[in-house]
Amino acid sequence: MKVRLPFIAMSVAGILAVSAGSALAVIPGTLDAEQTATTQSLLPEPLLAQTFVPTISGTLSAVEVYTSIYVPPSVVPAVPPSVTVQITGTASNVPTPTILDAVTITPASGGWNAVLFSPGIQVTAGTKYAILLNAGPSGTAEWNGACSDPYGPGAALISDAGTWKTIPNWNDQYCLTDFAFRTYVTAPAATPGLTPPPTSTSRGNDGDGSGYPGYLLLFAGLAAAASAAVLFSISRRRVTQH
């Protein structure tokens, strides 16, 4: 037993460490809308967007975007590239100017980026929203996506001189129709229902189920007791007077 204890302790510690690491990697909310194909990519300059439609009403707690990094041979960035991930509403199927939330990240090179919003953004199922990727004028991060319209409810867009266009309409060298993304929504907790008060099962002679005969018997008993008390008091007075 003395020989096994250190091994058991080390095993338990290892399990706890793995569990803790997994918990830290968990993205809050329920996976909702998504498009995961990454066959083509585009630099987020000008501004890029992907529209999406939640199927769950609640709080948009996080999104993921798939990025890669492109650095021309003649360019050596002084600092790691950064992109700002923004969420907006839409009007006429394109992003509106009002930014609901924004988070700046250092994008992955060929990987998913988890972007967490706090306290989150209230979204409504069936309403279209947009994920925007803004890398600024010197961005080298690319947003990967796919062709053939794999995500029907939304579309990949690019801002060209302030006008939103689909990618092929902007440049027919690209077939990209949807960027790679995932959204996570936390639905509100269900409100416990109130338990209705118990109803009387006694039925009166008229069959309305109100239980009046029971109350009448109770009142009759109380009245009889009160009458008895009054009579007893009168009897004592008479005895005392004699």
Image: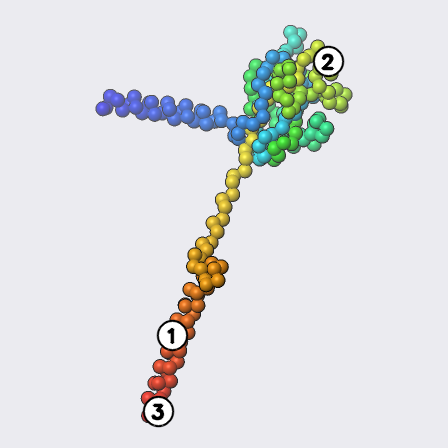
Residue extending farthest top: 73
Q: Tag 3's secondary structure?
A: helix
Residue 17 % position (x, y)? 40, 24
Tell me how far mark 1 sits from mark 2, CA to CA: 98 Å
Mark 2: amino acid: Asn
Residue 218 % position (x, y)? 41, 68
- Marks 1 and 2, the one that precedes in the sequence: 2
Report the label total: 3
- Asked if residue 36 shows in the view, the reply is yes
Which residue is under mark 3? 241
Residue extending farthest front: 206
Residue positioned 57% across, 18% down in the render: 36
Q: Which picture quadrant has residue 168?
A: top right
Residue positioned 37% across, 24% down in the render: 15
- Marks 2 and 3, the one that precedes in the sequence: 2
Which residue is under mark 1? 225
Tell me how far mark 3 sits from mark 1, CA to CA: 25 Å
Q: Tag 2's secondary structure?
A: loop
